[in-house]
Amino acid sequence: MKISGVDVRELKKEYGTPLYIYDAAMLKNNMRLYINNFKSNQFETEVLFASKAFNVKEMVRIVDQEGLSLDCVSVGEFYTALNVGYDPKKVYFHGNNKSPDELRFIIMNNVGTIVVDNLMELVALDMITKELKKNVNIIIRLNVGVSAHTHKFIVTAHVDSKFGVAYKSDDYNTMLEVINKSEYINFLGFHSHIGSQIFDLKAFDAALEKLITYCKDFDKPLVLNIGGGFGVHYTDEDQPIPFDVVSKNLIETCENALAKSNVKIKKLCIEPGRSIVGEAGYTLYTIGFTKKTPNKEYYFIDGGMTDNIRPALYQAKYDCDIIDKENDKKDHTVTIAGKCCESGDLIIEDYKLPEANPGDLLITYTTGAYGYSMSSNYNKALTPAVVFVEDGKSKLVVRRMTLDELIEREE
Ligand SMILES: Cc1ncc(COP(=O)(O)O)c(C=O)c1O
């Protein structure tokens, strides 16, 4: 099997397994689909990459080259961007519990916009801006109460969500008072993120229409950020909508809702993560032992929940193949299990594959989002390497962790 012209067997030889492989051409293409189609002649538009999905230096460089802005949720993500010379003014900084030190750090490093999550944060931010005598742009994260069809653990905008405030709630009203009195806080607009892996565009339309209604309370045209969450193909259960269609649909909904309500906005933003990197990413493993129990057959791989926690965390489903056996008869129903000391360390359950032998390579698809970024060193597993491939060439972008690096911070 080749990815962007590179044979995965060669990648195994050069970089070992487990290995995260990204098709850089596909990443760029996904970004372009958003950038080229998320455009309006009635308001400005901005596409942000939600870097929590996959934040490494090379990725940020590509985001920069392709002209996207960046959503960061931690000082770590922000620092990575600063380190490669990414313009901090193009960063939207999220988080429901930003510490005073984090707020100081991002303000002193000229963050573009802070997405304020709650009242206490705004009060703290107001004090910090006074102390630093620095102006900051903010948008308020709203909980628009639209629940999108997705797994409940990744729905974030229901009323009791840990994220955001509800429109016209006591906290919301007090936030507007704090903003009005504040010397340094510049209120730009609203943010909403209704969930992840969403296929029904009507959910975004509903959220957007709500945000537009709220704009009526303000004299100036606001910035609206409708978040990310656009679905991708993990298995054939998923039927994603092409990203150019998603983009055009959001613009059209926004233009129609503005016309109906006689409201003007300054800018519309989206912040896709998974849909930019998900399908561009693969994970390559080596199969070790196999085992039959009375009711199951296992293929054991040299990675597992440490490089892909999503199946254990929220029963995420994936497709996979054995390299060079893609077209063989798939007559074994197997469970792909990792090597961690957890019975839940199962990457794919009850999946049809051909017979495997030790040393065979197994590839899982659509692992580009929330794989590397959620990886851990549980059982003191070494973080795998990350390689980008494009036009027949590979480039190592994260070196595999070494045993010495694993313990270097320990006394
Ligand atoms: C605020 C916010 N924006 C954007 C995203 C990106 O979502 P996705 O990767 O599903 O596009 C998330 C994901 O959790 C989020 O919480």
Image: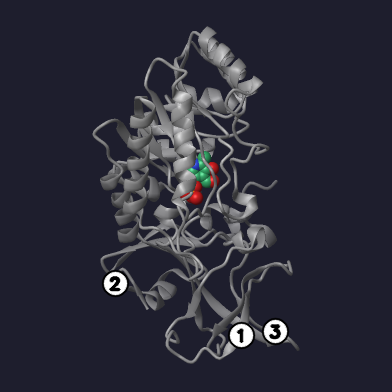
In the rendered image, residue 328, in percent from the top left (x then y), is placed at 46, 91
Q: Secondary structure at mark 2?
A: loop
**Among the 4 quarters of the image, the one containing residue 69:** top left
Q: Amino acid at mark 2?
A: Gly
In the picture, the disc for residue 5 is: 2
User: Is any part of residue 171 visible from this angle?
Assistant: yes
The one nearer the camera, 86 or 51, is: 51
Q: Amino acid at mark 1?
A: Thr
Instruction: Tell me the distance, in whole angstroms, between the alpha carbons under discs 1 and 2.
Output: 31 Å
Quarter of the picture containing the N terminus is bottom left
**Among the 4 quarters of the image, the one containing residue 280:** bottom left
Q: Does residue 379 appear left or right of residue 148 in this picture? A: right
Query: Which mark lies nearer to you, 1 or 2?
Result: 1
User: Is any part of residue 55 visible from this angle?
Assistant: no
Categorize mark 1 by other alpha carbons within 10 Å: few (<14), some (14-19), many (20+): some
The one nearer the camera, 92 or 11, is: 92
Categorize mark 2 by other alpha carbons within 10 Å: few (<14), some (14-19), many (20+): some
In the picture, the disc for residue 249 is: none
Say whether disc 3 or disc 1 marks the residue closer to the N-terminus: 3
In the rendered image, residue 61, in percent from the top left (x then y), is placed at 34, 45
Instruction: Tell me the distance, in whole angstroms, between the alpha carbons under discs 3 and 1.
Output: 8 Å
Categorize mark 3 by other alpha carbons within 10 Å: few (<14), some (14-19), many (20+): few
Q: Amino acid at mark 3?
A: Lys
In the picture, the disc for residue 296 is: 3
Q: Name the residue rendered at 41%, 47% in the picture.
A: 57
In the rendered image, residue 39, in percent from the top left (x then y), is placed at 27, 40
The one nearer the camera, 316 or 264, is: 264
In the rendered image, residue 405, in percent from the top left (x then y), is placed at 57, 54
Say whether disc 1 or disc 2 marks the residue closer to the N-terminus: 2
The residue beneath circle 1 is: 333
The one nearer the camera, 240 or 10, is: 240
